[in-house]
Amino acid sequence: MSVYNVNYLLRELLRDHAFRAAMKKNPAEALKNCDITDEERKLLLAGDVGGLHRLGVNDFLMGYLPRFEICGLNPKIYGERISKEAPRAK
Amino acid sequence: MAEIVGALGVPHTPFFPFFVERDGPDCETARYFAALRAELEALKPDVLLMFDTDHLNTFFFDNLPIFAIGVTDSFTGACDEVRATPIYTIKSHPALAAHVHGACVAAGYDPAVSQNFAVDHSVIVPLHFLTPQMQFPVIPFWISGHVPPLPSARRCYELGRAVRRAIESFPESLRVVTMGSGSISLEVWGPRLKIGFGDGVPDPDWVTRVCGLLEKGDIETLIKESTPEKFQATGNVAGELLNWIAMLGTIDAGPAKSVQPQMPNGHAYAVWS
């Protein structure tokens, strides 16, 4: 259930302003002690929201990355990447 | 005895307060909310009960109820940094909320209960426009409309009917207005967004279809067509329509008094009185 931890840290971008600032400044350092897999870490640091989407990470929570311009994402770059993915089944 | 005197369907786009502050009282969103505010004030409510879908702010994947009700003296929000709004403190009506909770459990709906919570934009944005003085007690009733599996439209409608029976059996004389908060067709940060924006409207025809059914009062067809497949096709937050459907159950809805779609945003403003 590691995806839970990715979803959790994404929500922390909204709730924990110190973590948000750390992720804006140096995401690799900020994620160093987070309990996520190597693959999840790699996708996050690359701003690969398509890959995270395919892993099952929540789209709404991923929106905090472009909203706060973290991991090289803004709404345009995020949109270009996520729009290549298939919508998630209900 | 308490009674339901009217119902509203509202959107809750989190950017609306900022847009209205920027664009002024004559912009479309301001005018649509102002019309609804006049309707609400004419209903002279004592309490509002709002069906709403939380966006993983009040609840999270560690504990994510299908249905939940807030039973508290007051609560705060928005807890998700909504621009151009203060952090409001909103009084509630814990006696009525506890009564509705108990009646819903007795009727087989088993909502979770929260006595200590903050709410996100989905509750605050409509209230910001409709009751900026926060003069009415508000009872939030959450329905899981984003994270599958969603409850069925039929169950949400019947839940609304159970809420109505609960309110009508509350001994205090109260005028209650129910609300459904949410979009009809909307994708938020998912693959069908409009590039450069946080959202998009995957199926404008569904918005038109829903608004037409609401105008006619054909709620049975709306329930039958509001399937998991339809929600899948119309956006990753399209299940917010379940909040409207529960609201419709509280009034055994006939034709709406008014329905105003807002097509670029995939939602509508509506009133029953």
Image (cartoon, coloured by chain):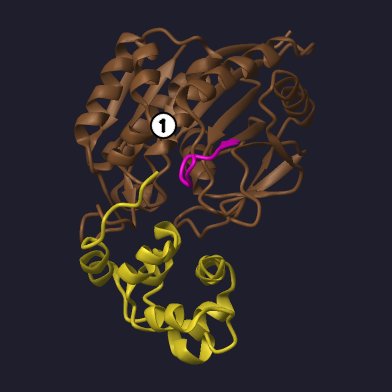
Chain colours: A yellow, B brown
Q: Residue at x 39, y 30 (%)?
A: B34
Q: What stretch is highlighted in magenta?
A: B142-149
Q: Can residue B27 be seen in this view?
A: yes
Examine the rendered structure and indicate whether residue A30 appears above or below residue B77.
Answer: below
- Corner quadrant of residue A40: bottom left
Q: Can residue B257 be seen in this view?
A: no
- Residue B106 on image: x %, y %: 75, 20
Please report the residue visible at 28 percent of the width from the left and 39 percent of the height from the top. B233
Query: In the image, is B93 to the left or to the right of B235?
Result: right
Q: Quadrant of the N terminus of chain B?
A: top right
Could you tell me what secondary structure mostly forms the magenta stretch?
A: loop
Examine the image and state in which quarter residue B162 appears.
Answer: top right
Q: Residue at x 43, y 41 (%)?
A: B12
**Left or right, B117 with reference to A24:** right
Secondary structure at numbered mark 1: helix
Residue on which disc 1 sits: B241
